[in-house]
Amino acid sequence: AQSVTQPDIHITVSEGASLELRCNYSYGATPYLFWYVQSPGQGLQLLLKYFSGDTLVQGIKGFEAEFKRSQSSFNLRKPSVHWSDAAEYFCAVGASGGSYIPTFGRGTSLIVHP
Amino acid sequence: DSGVTQTPKHLITATGQRVTLRCSPRSGDLSVYWYQQSLDQGLQFLIQYYNGEERAKGNILERFSAQQFPDLHSELNLSSLELGDSALYFCASSTQSSDTQYFGPGTRLTVL
């Protein structure tokens, strides 16, 4: 069974600073990988996804993520954080060879200081 | 706005009661998924329907059931409610099972 670990429960950054949110997955084959963002009181919004091909994936709102098979990681990055990026971020892994139902990590809460 | 709608937004009820949550998928989406989000369990997949048929089952309790109607909207029925059922319940939809899921705003259920 697949699993996802987001090691950081909370991350605090200053506005304008760079950001990296960590995600490690466990899955036997090539996974489908996702990053979602959840703002307070809102549903989840897809930021980006990796199915195959280029391991550096560009998403919405200036986010990108890099799939590293050797490290079983799919870290999310943004070069300059805006106050509006404060939210909960979820990494998810889906099984490419069967059910596509994603398994979600526990989330990382991003706090942005002015 | 994802195009997925859920009603009601909030629901407060008592233990032992039964409630129904409703979801309308994005136009054209055949697949509907239900998730439960709680502080202690995180985001858990409950069940998936595809074009009216149950397609996948996750950590769904026997007290919970769902269905997808011919117009593709879905309902999640929660019965014999317990305090621990208090959570956010999300619906998501996709065109095919392998496609990206789009989430609704959720229904916050409080069981007193």
Image (cartoon, rainbow, N blue to C red):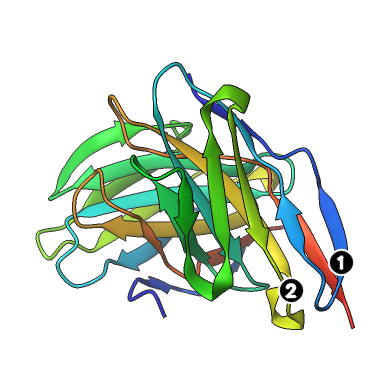
Horizontally, residue B16 falls left or right of residue B33, namely: right
Q: Residue A77, located in which quarter of the rendered image?
A: bottom right
Q: Which residue is drawn at 49% across and 49% down?
A: A56
What's the residue type where badge 2 is placed? Val
Task: Between residue B88 and residue A113, name the one nearer to us.
Answer: A113
Q: Can residue B17 be seen in this view?
A: no
Residue drawn at (27%, 51%) of the image: B99
Q: Which chain carries label 1?
A: A
Q: Mark 2 points at which residue?
A: A81
Depth check, front residue: B90 or A106: A106
Q: Residue B64, image x and y in percent?
A: 43, 41
Q: Which of A3 and A60 is in front in this view?
A: A60
Q: In which quarter of the image is residue A112?
A: bottom right
Give, as a three-letter code, the residue at label 1.
Answer: Val
Please state the total of marks drawn on the protein image. 2
Q: Mark 1 points at which residue?
A: A13
- A27 lies left or right of B13: left
**Would you call the spot at circle 1 few (<14 residues within 10 Å), some (14-19), or many (20 or more)?**
some
Q: In this view, does B60 lie above or below B14?
A: above
Contact between marks 1 and 2 (CB within 8 A): the answer is yes
Residue B107 in percent (x, y) is at 52, 66
Q: Where is residue A11 in the image (x, y as percent from the top left)?
A: 84, 56
Can residue A3 be seen here? yes
Name the residue located 35 percent from the left edge and 50 percent from the top edge.
Answer: B33
